[in-house]
Image: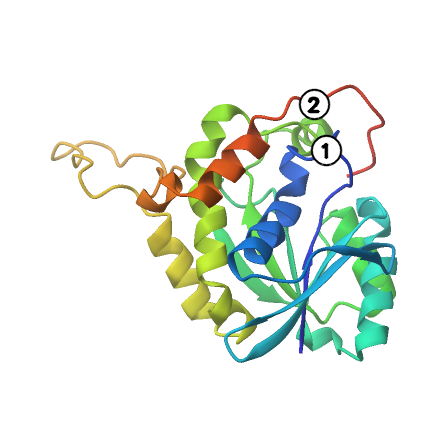
Amino acid sequence: MILLVGLGNPGPDYAKNRHNIGFMAVETIHRRHGFSPWRAKFSGEVSEGNIGAEKVVALKPMTYMNESGRSVAAAAQFYKIEPADIIVLHDELDLLPGKVKVKFGGGHAGHNGLRSLTAHIGPDFHRVRLGIGHPGAKELVHNWVLGNFAKVDGEWVIPLLEGISAAAPKLVAKDFIGFMNEVAIATRVAPEEKPAPKGAAPAPDKPAGPAPAAKNAMAETLRALLALKKPPGRRPGN
């Protein structure tokens, strides 16, 4: 059994934040793979389903980011799931927007959600790092992660989330190389893009353009999410 955790902050005030891309990813997997309805439990929202041959428990902690570990520890204890079978999807400042990397163990790099998880279950869990880019200066990080995705970000966020949900069978089977490769293919730059002139400096790495699947119903749901307007409200720590 796999515990699949998306990190974020609860409520409509934060639904469109860069910090909530972990929530978005788990919600997209939940929809695509026909999980049971979300229910309140473990200081979070939990759902169960099957992806391929694997039984999966999906969890969104509703504790605010810096207390995520309480929710994850409670769910892991109830289902008797070891940290090595916990997969956490979270935002990553140190990756370009749209890039995905999977790692096992390690530090928290200042991410309060990972800090809380490490305090409650130790560091030995899998992390799916979802690149949101860095604002360029440390003092800008707080507002960056708690800021909303712009509409134009949908051009890479939608294909990314759809790619993650399509590749979820490889993720829960712990075929992490296969998972990353499949996501990379789903989010690649359109092949019709013209190459740079000979001798020109290489273009900087950039987020992928929209995939054909972005026209389906799931994409419309994601577009609606990204179109939410954020009312003023409490700003939790990142």
Can residue 98 be seen here? The reply is no
Left or right, residue 184 beside residue 142? left
Q: Which residue is mark 1?
A: 14
Left or right, residue 43 beside residue 129? right
CB under 8 Å between discs 2 and 1: yes
Residue 146 sits in which quadrant?
A: top right
Check residue 62 in the rendering and tell me which mark sits there, or answer none. Answer: none
Q: Position of residue 47 (x, y in %)?
A: 71, 62
The one nearer the camera, 212 or 131, is 212
Three-letter amino acid code at the position of disc 2 = Lys
Alpha carbon separation for disc pair 2 and 1: 7 Å
Q: Position of residue 224 (x, y in %)?
A: 55, 31
Mark 2 element type: loop
Residue sitting at x 34%, y 43%: 211
Q: Which residue is mark 2?
A: 230
Residue sitting at x 16%, y 37%: 195
Residue sitting at x 46%, y 26%: 152
The one nearer the camera, 201 or 134, is 134
Placement of 157 over or under 152, stated as above or below: below
Residue 89 sits in which quadrant?
A: bottom right
Placement of 197 over or under 184, stated as above or below: above
